[in-house]
Amino acid sequence: MLVTKKAISRRSILRGAGAALSLPFLDAMVPALAKGAAKPPMRLAFVYVPNGIIMKHWTPAADGAEFALSSTMGPLAPFRDRMLVLSGLAQKNGRALGDGAGDHARAAASYLTGVHPKKTEGADIQNGISVDQIAANAIGQATRLPSLELALEGGGLVGACDSGYSCAYSNAIAWRGAQTPLPPEINPRAVFERLFGDGEFQDRPTRLRVAAENRSLLDYVMEDAARLRRDVGVADRSKIDEYLSSVREIERRISLSEKQDRENGENAALEPKLPKPAGVPVTFEEYARLMFDLTAIAFQTDSTRILTFMVGREGSNRTYRSIGVPDAHHGLSHHMGAEDKITKLAKINQLHVEMFAYLLDKLRNTPDGDGNLLDHSTIVYGSGLSDGNRHLHHDLPVLIAGGTNGAFRTGRHVRYESETPLNNLFMSLLDVVGVRETSLGDATGPLPRLGDLT
């Protein structure tokens, strides 16, 4: 731990045997930051939901600042003034364009790239670089992890998953390049160790020793933490204590799930067809909250500023028995107008939004510089399909939450002309994080009206 009389470095780390914890933003860091960037950094995240959304329960009836939240967006009421709902955007390269079936694979593959993926089941996949990786290439060197890819459902990158398309297309939305999908991490323990292990991953001997001794990873950095607490003010001591408590609580929940797996075997009663690694909580809600907590702490420690999060793989057949929906999600999405299936789908859509609201609440309640993490984040929530029954790639569900550095005027529903490229929005998002890009997929330029006063 390097501490000076004037300030501590924003990149200071608590170290111990096999552990390395980045610090949250502290008051003691301000003098050092004042020499360069005085403001906390902007974070950019994309939260993806599969199989489309029941749009009649999603799209607000009114435009502008007077819009009322739709039933699906109801859980986001506390964040209405920090949201921007956009209608009319399309990802045209998700369409068949002569390639026939495979809309789910194309929906995920084209979502952040704007590129029409090559139809193949083999190793000759061809897509494009995704917007998150464009940002990571430009600003990722400022953090330990240039980007972080997370998901709540597993799936490989080889083999066929959708009508002649490789599984790489359905199971990843982040692409480092045309032939390099970035598989998302679904194991909370692996994410925890990536964030807090010494190096990218904690070494195996230390991990086994920690487990054998039934100790917390934090036990190995407490001596360093005690030294730091002596060199900062009262307010910073409180921040450090709250931060360490949050890390310990996340670790406790991961350990509890691992213990349940060891004692009882994998409990598939609630998710009978969903493969998961050991240590993943049984219920979807517990799992989502844990992974969103890891998302928040990754931003809090400035471990990364770029993140993608797949709530489910495209074409997901997850069931949601905890809300009374034992039917497979993808199967329900082909409802053929049956109202009972539409009602169940709407319940799934609302549950996903509830989990997203949990993330926003976590960010809002985490101090960061002169505000909170939500103030200093731009988070896109949406899907690569609108109507999952008809596999529509236009009028997509798009919601932006966060402070956006004041670049966007939130608290509005903005309706664009049909077929406006979704990639125009992504070009504007790159501007928010200071990345100037001249082209992206089928973009025609930055999306207008995002900063309008009305």
Image: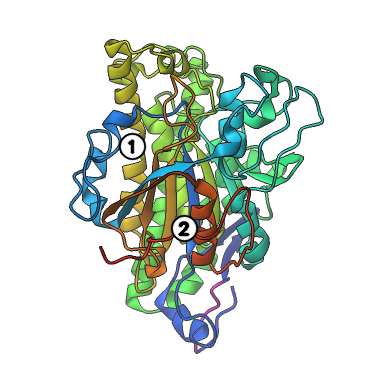
User: Mark 1 or mark 2: which comes first in sequence?
Assistant: 1
Q: Is residue 277 magenta?
A: no
Residue type at mark 1 is Val
Q: Toward the viewer: 149 or 300?
A: 149
Q: Where 385 sits versus 177, above or below?
A: above
> Percent x, y for residue 209?
64, 42
Residue 301 is left or right of residue 435, and the answer is left
The percent position of residue 99, horizontal first and vertical second, equals 68, 24
Q: Residue at x 42, y 26 (%)?
A: 387
* Magenta span main SS: loop
Q: Secondary structure at mark 1?
A: helix
Q: Nearer the viewer, residue 195 or 197?
A: 195
Q: Residue at x 27, y 18 (%)?
A: 343
- Checking the image for residue 353, the label placed there is 1
Give percent across and percent down for residue 400. 39, 51
| The N terminus: image quadrant | bottom right
Who's the residue at 60% across and 63% down the image?
15
Q: In the image, what residue type sits under mark 2? A: Leu
Height in image: 414 above or below 50? below
